[in-house]
Amino acid sequence: MLNSFAFDLVVSFSIILPAITGLIKLNQVRWNYLPFILLIWIGLFNEVISTIFIFSTHSNTINSNIYVLIEYSLLLFQFYKWNGIERKKCCYLILLGIVVWIIDNVILNSVWTNNSIFRIFYSFAIIFLSINQISKVIINERMSLLKNTIFLICIAFLIYYGCKAFIEIFNAFHLGFSNAFNRNIFMILYFANLFSNVIYAYAILCIPTKQEFSLLY
Amino acid sequence: MHPNETRIFLAILTGVLVIIFLIGVFIISAIYHQKQNAQLKLAQLSVQLKALERERARIAADLHDDLGSSLAAIRLQIKHLKTNNQNDAAIIDEAKSYIDEAIQKLSYVSFNMMPLILQRNGLSDAIKELTEMIELTTAIKIKCDCTVDIGDNDRRIHFYRIIQEVLNNIVKHSKATAVNISVSRNERYILVDITDNGIGFDKDRIIKNSIGRGLKNIKSRVEVLKGKSYLSTGINKGVHYSFEIPDTEHNG
C-alpha cells in the first residue's frame, strides 16, 4: 500500500520537470506561452496541497475541484493567446465552464466529493481545441513539427485529456467495481500524466528565444 | 481484483493503448506529410520567384534598350528644332521637359525592375544606390552599413528585394525621418537589420487579419533563403526588421 502510494506521489510530482524547465526559460518565454507556464506551477502547487491534505484530512477533493476550474480557464486563455479561439468565444466558454462547474459541484453533488461531469466537459473542450490547433500548426508550420512547442503541447493534451475523459466517463457510471479495479483504472491516467509532463518539459525547452514573425497563408 | 474485473481492466487497457497507438500513427503521418508539403511549397515558391525575376530583368532590359533609346532619339530631334516663333519655342521647351521627365521615370521604373548595378557591382553598391534614390525623393535620411557581398546571383537578388521591400514599406507607411540598415556576417548567418523611427503598426492586427502584402513578399523571399524573420514594433515605436539567413557560401 505504502509502495503504491509512493509510486503515485512520484508520478504526480513529475510535474516538477516542466516546472523546472519553465523556471529556466522564464526570462526567454514570450507572453503567448505564459498561461501554460503559470498552469504548470499552479499544478505543482496543487500537488503539494493535495499531499498535505491527504496526510492530514485524508481527502484532497476540495482543492482538486477548485484546481480543475482554474486549469480549464487558464488553458482556454492559453488557446486564445495562440489564436486558437476568438476572444468572445473564449469568454463564453469560460462562463459556460463556470456554470457546468456550479451544476456539478454545488447543485447536483458537493464540492467535497469527486465529481465527473465538469471533468468530462472540460476534457472534451480541451481535446477539440487541441485538435483544431494541431491542424493549424500542420498547415502553417514550415519547420520541423517535433520542435514546435504548440504542436508538442497539444499532442500531450490529446493523450492526457483523452485518457481523462475516458476514465471520468467510466467513473461517472458508478459500476460498483472493487477499489483495486478503480485504482488500476486510474493508474492509466497517472501514466498518461507522467508521459504528458515529460512532453511539456521538452516542449518548454523548445520555446524559441525570439518569436519569429509569421503570417497565416 | 475479481477475475472478471481483471478481464474488463485488460480490455480497457488494450482499448486505451490502441487509441494511443493510433494517435502515434497520426503524429508520424502528419510530420511526414507536413515535411513533404513544406519542401514542395518551398520549391514551388523558389521557381515562381525565379520566373518573376527573369521576367522583370527582361522588361527592364526592354524598357531601357527599346523605349529608352526611342525617348532619347525623340529628345535629340526636339533639341535640333529651331524656331523664331516664341509660342513654338515655348512648346518645344515644354516638350523637352516632358521627355526628360519621361526618361527619368523610365530610368526609375527600370531601376526598380532590375538594377543593373546589382549584377555588375554587387549588393553593397546596389543598396547604396537605392538608398540614395530614396533620400533624393523623400525626406528620409538613411544610414547604411553593408559590408557583405553575395556571390550567388539568385541569392543576391533575394537579399536586394527584401531590403527594397522593407524600404518601400517604410516610405509608404511609416512617416519615418531616419532609417538604419545593417548587413553583416557572422560564423553561420548573414544578418540584415533595418530600423526606422516611424509610427509603427499593430502587429497583432496584421497577423490576425493576414494583411500586409509587402510583409508576405518579404516572408516568401526569406523562406526561399531558408532564413528567419523577426519583427518588433508598436504604435509610435518605429519598426525593427531583423533577418537571419544561413550563410551557405561560407558554410557549404
Image (spheres, coloured by chain):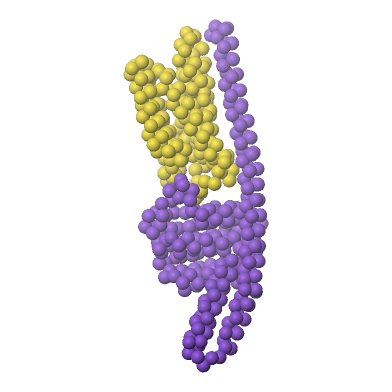
**Depth order, front residue of B199/B180:** B199
Horizontal placement of A67 versus A3: left or right? left
**For this rendering, which residue is in front, B181 or B163?**
B163
Question: Residue B16 appears in which quarter of the rendering?
Answer: top right
Residue B184 position in % (x across, y down): 54, 63
Q: Is residue B44 above or below residue B55?
A: above
Of residues B58 and A20, the one drawn nearer to the viewer in this rendering: B58
Vertical arrangement, residue B196 with respect to residue B82, above or below: above
**Is A121 above or below relative to B124?**
above
Q: Is residue A199 visible?
A: no
Q: Quadrant of the C terminus of chain B?
A: bottom right
Residue A83 visible to an observer of this rendering: yes
Quarter of the rendering containing residue B107: bottom right
Q: Residue at x 41, y 52 (%)?
A: B202
Q: How many marks?
A: 0
The chain drawn yellow is chain what? Answer: A
Report x, y in % for residue A35: 41, 37
Chain B painted colour = purple
Relative to B9, is A69 on the left or the right? Answer: left
Name the residue: 56% across, 72% down. B106
Outermost residue, bottom side: B84
The picture places residue A117, in percent across and down from the top left corner, at: 42, 19
Q: Looking at the image, which residue is at 39% across and 54% down?
A: B234
Q: Residue at x 47, y 38 (%)?
A: A84
Q: Residue furthest left?
A: A106
Tell me: residue B132, above or below residue A56: below
Residue A77's x, y, as percent?
41, 36
